[in-house]
Amino acid sequence: MELLPHKSKQALLIFLHLAGWALFIYLTFPHFDRAGRLPDFHIPWFAVINYSFLAVYFYCNVCVFVPRFLSGKKIALFLGISVAAYLFFCLLIPLLFRSFSEPPFRPEMWPRRPGFLPPDRMEPPFGLFKRLGIHVHSSQFLIVFIVSTGVKAISQWYAEKQRLQELENSMVQAELSFLKSQLHPHFLFNSLNSIYYLALSKNGKAPEAILSLSDFLRFVTTESNQSRIPMEKEIRMLEEYIHLQRLRASEKFELIFQVNGDFRNRTIMPLTFVPFVENAFKYGISAYMNCFIHIGLTLENSRLKFTCDNSIFPGLKDSNSSTGVGLENIRKRLELAYAKRHSLDMNASSRAFCVKLQIELE
């Protein structure tokens, strides 16, 4: 939401420009010299010419020279234009003013006009520079050159930085959307396998599993389209998924799911924990052997801690360490959504596969 409307921004910009030029003229307008004489700037039209040229050069530098030549890597042309403008302002304009404002030298008038110097007593070049006010003109020009070049260069750098940031954000969102689109069929495929197992064994829990799958898919197709969702919804969907997968577990299966902390007013990326739990159910349970899945979710201040440990069976250890779409997908999503604000450790031992995830929530 914009703080100021467009017309107000334009009025403020015009005011700032006028105030800047007024301050510049006040600070750079020459005052009396040591002899109590005013320099040539006491003539109004000469001052108007000088400051008009500086204003024209300022806006030409901002609008044309810097964006087209300096930013366009035409540095030699930019420097050539700057030097030409400097010579025109600091030498040509004062010389032209002198030639039109002073009467020609008349030797017979010299004794009565001490302001004139005879040819044999003409000032050296440095004296001429002082009479022309080169140091004053140079200071004025350098101030305008530095300010105009610096302001435009900084504004272009900031605009380019904003453009790159917007491009990066759009690419991140596009990649997150693509990764989510991969997750949906992945979960559906594994859930249908669970329901198929229940139907094949003629288990009466199959209708309940279908209802749980329906609720979970409703979440996947609605809530997961957002970049952040409330933590309560993510936990409920995790519970729904655990309930769906537990229907096919045997009596030898031990499940522990603990949640600790106040999750109100906290948000998180959707489908953050389900891939780890899905991987645990896929490779951590057996119908014939003792097995377990231990899940923990804790919030301390702004630090979220998630753990998921599951049993490992011979021949399936490698599958836990690299499970294709599931774990690799969530690893990429975490890198995109919580860059430098999360840590993920996945370790496999001879008996268990352990996942430890920590996220610094906003």
Image (cartoon, rainbow, N blue to C red):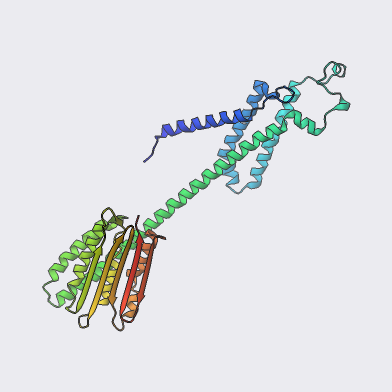
Q: Residue 315 or 359: which is nearer the viewer?
A: 359
Q: Residue at position x 53%, y 32% from top?
A: 17
For residue 326, side relative to residue 243 (left or right) = right
Which residue occupies 65% across, 40% down?
Answer: 82
Q: Quadrant of residue 238?
A: bottom left
Figure label count: 0
**On screen, 296 above or below 349?**
above
Does residue 246 sit above or below 162 in this rendering?
A: below
> Horizontal and vertical percent for residue 269?
31, 58
Q: Which residue lies furthest to the right in this view?
A: 120
* Figure quadrant of residue 152: top right
The residue sitting at 71% across, 34% down in the picture is: 135
- Taking depth in this image into account, of 99 and 348 the one nearest to the observer is 348
Res 285 seen here: no
Q: Is residue 181 left or right of residue 88?
A: left
Can residue 68 be spotted in the picture? yes
Position of residue 241 measured from the top left corner of the image (x, y, whole percent)? 22, 66
Asked whether 323 or 135 is in front, the reply is 135
Residue placed most toward the observer, 128 or 81: 128
Q: In which quadrant of the rendered image does the C terminus lie?
A: bottom left
Q: Where is residue 357 in the image (x, y as percent from the top left)?
A: 34, 66
Q: Residue shown at 30%/84% (left/top)?
A: 314
Residue extending farthest left: 204
Q: Is the N terminus in the top left, top right, bottom left or bottom right quadrant?
A: top left
* Quarter of the rendering containing residue 185: bottom left
